[in-house]
Image: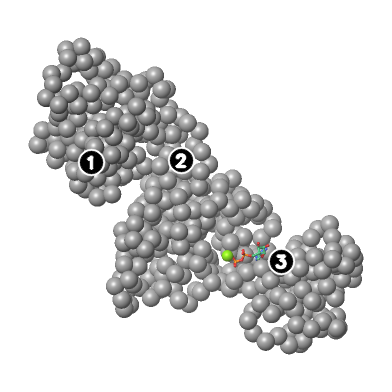
Amino acid sequence: MIESTVTANASELAPEWRRLELLGQSLALERQGEPVPDALIDDLKKAQHRVIGARDEHRTWSALNTTLLTTLELDVLACAVGPEAEPRLGWLFQTLQPTRPHPYPTLALIQELFALEARQIDELYGALGDTGALRRHRLVNVNAPGPYETIRPCEGVTSRLLGRADQPLAPPGANPVTLRVEWDQLILPEACLEALSEFLLWITHRETVFTHWGAQPTGGPVALFSGPSGTGKTFAASAIATRLGWPLYRVDLGRLVSKWLGETEENINTLFDAAHGRPMVLQFEEADSLFGKRGDVKEARDRYANLEISHLLARIETHEGPCILTTNLRRNLDPAFGRRFQLALEFPRPDATARGRLWRALLPPRAPLQGVDPDFLGRTVNLTGGEIRNAATHAAFLAAGRDGAIGLPEIALAVWRELGKRGKPVSPSDLGGLACHRSGVTS
Ligand SMILES: Nc1ncnc2c1ncn2[C@@H]1O[C@H](COP(=O)(O)OP(=O)(O)O)[C@@H](O)[C@H]1O
Ligand SMILES: [Mg+2]
């Protein structure tokens, strides 16, 4: 799935930039009504010749898998990438479009630079449409078709072309998650672990199944993790990324959604363009906000939200790379969405045995313990993994504060505090076998 990259070295690309620069210089002179000197025309011809030669031998653009692009499409690509590869071009383009001072070219500027004829102008607009190869291969971006829209390379295109190390930069709108989780740290029923392993197969064996065996291609894979808070959904996403050795990025839906109509869609596009072809796992937390009552449109604002959501879901589905959506509310899910995922997995609350294992795993491994039996703790109070982690850590702080070992009184108090966070009245009987250790403590 991840394309291997053959990078052009900077000297192979130099004639491309030189040619654009000379085209820009002659356009500036023409606009002022001045003659273009013969020397400039000669230089332009030479540059043109070198550009064609290098392109024919696939020495320049092969890093971007552009073998099927037309000459005009390559010219557009060069104009979009040029300002990033060669700042001189950015400044030149900026002076050539004084009412839209932007280092990236507009369609109008490209049309003028290459003195395109009517037929070629149609081709230019076609090339930048949704179905044009430049857009399909996520090479360039244009917000809307129109002569004064700027054309930019998609994220990562310039660095792929130039062989610059692909900076491990988070795609816009996403935050890196550095937590590493080994597979054996996951405490889940065997059936869940098995389903998670199957999800990994969808990632690691794409090439075999889609390319070699000719299965009907799908984007993704997309997994939906649902289940109560604290059951390990986020933790499992880290385990998947760790197993793959890929970075995990958590997408903040709040940062993606803009109050400006249309901008959200742009943000969504920027995110997925940046993620395209890069080995990474994308995780969307609280995905229920995406699947909430679609179609029940009460206000205009809702309708926009629905449009944005449809757009986001469409991009998730077509994105080639793993996406994990997590939600605490399975029931709210429109069943029509279920079919969109390659895996839908319900994370159960841990049973007594699993809780015992969680206590054993989550009490700080080098902390002194006194009279603590993790299996007893697992049997006696019904907490989720997340609650056990919090309680175990809180108990450790209580013990450290007393300069002593973690014992049942510390654990009883920590569990009491944790139960208090559920927002419901807590009674000592909720502490089960720990109740007798909570002497003297009041909430
Ligand atoms: N099934 C589990 N296996 C191992 N640890 C777990 C599990 N569930 C929860 N935990 C612990 O609780 C913490 C919080 O869980 P988290 O993954 O954030 O829950 P969720 O995303 O389902 O709300 C984890 O970081 C981990 O330490
Ligand atoms: Mg979570």
User: What kind of residue is marked 3?
Assistant: Arg
* CB within 8 Å, label 2 to label 3: no
Q: Is residue 373 visible?
A: no
Q: Residue furthest left?
A: 118
Dot 1 falls on a residue whose secondary structure is loop
| Residue 306 image label | none
| Residue 389 image label | 3
Residue under the point 37% across and 27% down: 86
* Closer to us: 82 or 430: 82
Residue under the point 85% across and 83% down: 440
Q: Is residue 31 above or below residue 394?
A: above
Distance from Cα at disc 2 to Cα at disc 3? 37 Å
Q: Nearer the viewer, mark 2 or mark 3?
A: 3
Q: Earlier in the sequence, mark 2 or mark 1?
A: 2
User: What kind of residue is marked 1?
Assistant: Thr
Q: Does any atom of ligand 1 lie closer than 8 Å to the CB of label 3?
A: yes
The residue at which mark 2 appears reads as 2
Query: Where does residue 284 sit, x and y in percent of width and height?
Result: 49, 60
The quadrant of the picture occupied by the N terminus is top left
Q: Earlier in the sequence, mark 3 or mark 1?
A: 1
Residue under the point 50% across and 47% down: 170
Q: Nearer the viewer, mark 3 or mark 1?
A: 1
Which quarter of the figure has residue 73?
top left
* CB within 8 Å, label 2 to label 1: no
Query: Where does residue 379 sit, x and y in percent of width and height?
Result: 77, 77
Distance from Cα at disc 3 to Cα at disc 1? 58 Å
Q: Quadrant holding ligand 2?
A: bottom right
Which quarter of the figure has residue 373?
bottom right
